Image: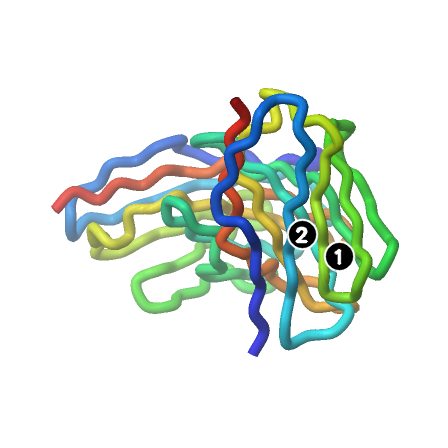
Amino acid sequence: QQQVKQSPQSLIVQKGGISIINCAYENTAFDYFPWYQQFPGKGPALLIAIRPDVSEKKEGRFTISFNKSAKQFSLHIMDSQPGDSATYFCAAEDNYGQNFVFGPGTRLSVLP
Amino acid sequence: SQTIHQWPATLVQPVGSPLSLECTVEGTSNPNLYWYRQAAGRGLQLLFYSVGIGQISSEVPQNLSASRPQDRQFILSSKKLLLSDSGFYLCAWSPPGFRNQPQHFGDGTRLSIL
């Protein structure tokens, strides 16, 4: 119940296309959902985060969509660029601030 | 601004040797501190977290231990390394006393056991 499922495991997109990564959770106590971006040889860095009181959050080319009833959330990268090639992790934290879990990650490759 | 430092960046150790990885945070007080391990092409496995000096919680049984001798210093250790200890070790911090705050990661230590 503490897990966050993430798909796909890997994703190849053409430059200019839309990249979509999906995550799902079971624990209804989760109420904070950040996404992290990790380049090879580096630590993950916060990309964008959402709380369940909104259904969508957009920052530049990155958008999180959140479906509370389905317990699913997704990251959309519009106009994907080769520089977006990285591993993306979704995560979730519960409303007690005690449980913080990461999804298994999605390796995104954007072809030039 | 806050910064997190990890060293060394890479380390090659023989099986059975000891290990000490260090992480320090600057620009904040009493941070929550975390050690993660990431196997090649895999997700993040939480190893230890600490909410204060001398307070360490272990998430999985293993060959490793952690200590927090100072407020902003977090150390990962082993007395005798195993082949299975190879991986990418990441330290992270988050603000104290607040929930729903992101974790901020260092650039990691790549550990290879021979």
Question: Is A62 placed above or below A85 here?
Answer: below
Q: In the drawing, does residue A55 fall left or right of residue A69?
A: left
- What residue lies at 62% left-to-right and 55% top-to-bottom? B92
Label 1 crowd bin: few (<14), some (14–19), many (20+), radius 10 Å: some
Q: Position of residue B66 (x, y in %)?
A: 76, 44
Q: In the drawing, does residue B95 fall left or right of residue B97?
A: left
- What residue lies at 48% left-to-right and 51% top-to-bottom? A43
Q: Position of residue B13 (x, y in %)?
A: 56, 31
- What residue lies at 25% left-to-right and 49% top-to-bottom? A18
Label 2 crowd bin: few (<14), some (14–19), many (20+), radius 10 Å: many
Q: CA distance from mark 1 to mark 2?
A: 6 Å
Q: Secondary structure at mark 2?
A: strand
- Quarter of the image holding residue A27? top right
- Quarter of the image holding residue B96? bottom right
Q: Which residue is mark 2?
A: A93
**Type of residue at label 1?**
Gly
